Image (spheres, grey):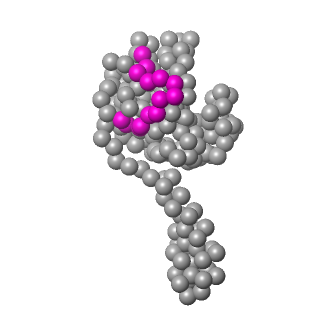
Amino acid sequence: MAAAATTALLARRDRRWALAAVPLSALTGGMLWFFRDPDRTLGEGLVLSPADGVVQSIDPWPDGRTRVAIFMSPLNVHVNRAPLAGNVTSVQHVAGGFLPAFNKDSDQNERVVWHFETALGDIEMVQIAGAVARRIVPYLSDGAKVERGDRIGLIRFGSRVDIYLPEGISPAVTVGEKTVAGVTRIDRG
């Protein structure tokens, strides 16, 4: 931002500085847009979407849980939120690759695995880095208490968030549906 402001001021005196001011200003605007973190009015339902994006897949898991995978493009807000109230029982960083987040093999990418102790029991959520997203920033650690919709972390640039619904909880979303973190209901009541 400092470089954009400085070159913009210099461009007022000498138009040649505009060659630097224009791309630097565009880059600054893009970064401000990407790292936005709007306040949200919480949605209805027990389990809320942890991420802005599009439901990429809904898969039954062998242990009875259902995985809902949400793909976040670079145009989405990348601040992730707690899907429901509870306590953080584990935040584990797992090293891995950097395949595009929409790739089915991206389960092996760099990721942070969260576990929440909630009224529904253990809820697992996984933040997955993508080809461009190479940094996941958790805001909380083990033992933290969270409310539905609290900000819990950030994935920089394109990525994916998976939430595992416990056995007996059906998803209220469908593949291709857009979600809004802290607003869209994930569980079918």
* Residue 136 visible in image: no
Q: Nearer the viewer, residue 113 or 40?
A: 40
51 left or right of 25 in image:
left
Instruction: Residue at 33% x, 43% y: name it.
Output: 40
Q: Position of residue 138 (x, y in %)?
A: 49, 43
Relative to 30, say whether 92 is above or below.
Answer: above
Q: Position of residue 136 (x, y in %)?
A: 55, 44
The verdict on residue 39 being magenta is no
Q: Position of residue 31 (x, y in %)?
A: 53, 58
Relative to 111, say whether 78 is above or below.
Answer: below
Instruction: Residue at 42% x, 50% y: name it.
Output: 37
The verdict on residue 181 being magenta is yes
Relative to 148, say whether 17 is above or below.
Answer: below
Q: Nearer the viewer, residue 89 or 164?
A: 164
What secondary structure characterizes most of the magenta part? loop
Instruction: Residue at 53% x, 12% y: name it.
Output: 63
24 left or right of 188 in image:
right
Instruction: Residue at 51% x, 62% y: name it.
Output: 29
* Quadrant assignment, res 140: top left
* Residue 151 visible in image: yes
Q: Position of residue 142 (x, y in %)?
A: 44, 36
Which span is picked out in magenta?
170-183
- Position of the C terminus, as image quadrant, is top left
Number of marks drawn: 0
